[in-house]
Amino acid sequence: MAKKTRIKAKLKKGVVTVKALANHANLSYQEAERAKKEANFITYVVAKVNDKIVYEVSTSQFLSKNPYMKFKFNADAVGAKKGDELVFSWVDLKGNTREDSKKIK
């Protein structure tokens, strides 16, 4: 099981800035072949606040090991406020999932 995703979410002037550090080896096909392992990398990432999607991305094998993601969203558009829970989750090539959450400060 992967370690917890480290998340920071801060609301300032109506904009929430999110920084997330996902813990995943992200072995591309080429790296896996060299290491004689099976390829496995994050393929989908989604972040939600109040069950509304604020960040969604499909990724490829070219994502780095333990990827760092930073994004912003308009808090008023989704009704986000300080104390609300931001839920950050990902799925990898093998179907493994990870979901972590953090309160917006």
Image (spheres, rainbow, N blue to C red):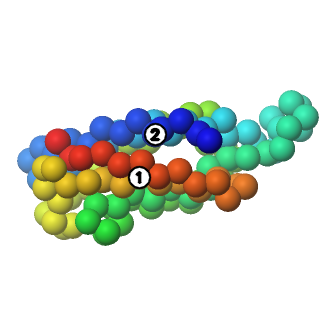
C-beta proximity under 8 Å, tags 2 and 1: yes
Near-viewer residue (62 or 39): 39
As drawn, the residue found furthest toward the left would be 13
Secondary structure at numbered mark 2: loop
As drawn, the residue found furthest toward the front would be 1
| Image position, residue 8 (x, y; %) | 30, 38
| Image position, residue 59 (x, y; %) | 59, 54
Residue 102 tag number: none
10 Å crowding of disc 1: few (<14), some (14-19), many (20+): many
Side of 70 where 84 appears, left or right: left
Q: Which residue is mark 1?
A: 88
Residue 15 can be seen, yes or no: no
Dividing the image into 4 quarters, which one contains the N terminus? top right
Near-viewer residue (24 or 76): 24
Side of 26 where 37 appears, left or right: right
Residue at the location (34% across, 61% down)?
48
Side of 79 where 72 appears, left or right: right
**2 or 1: tag closer to the N-terminus:** 2
Q: Amino acid at mark 2?
A: Thr
How far apart are the two marked residues, 2 and 1, measured between alpha carbons? Answer: 8 Å
Residue at the location (53% across, 36% down)?
3
Q: Quadrant of residue 76?
A: bottom left
Residue 5 tag number: 2
Residue 37 can be seen, yes or no: yes
Residue at the location (67% across, 40% down)?
26
| Image position, residue 24 (x, y; %) | 61, 38
Q: Quadrant of residue 18?
A: top left
Q: Amino acid at mark 1?
A: Phe
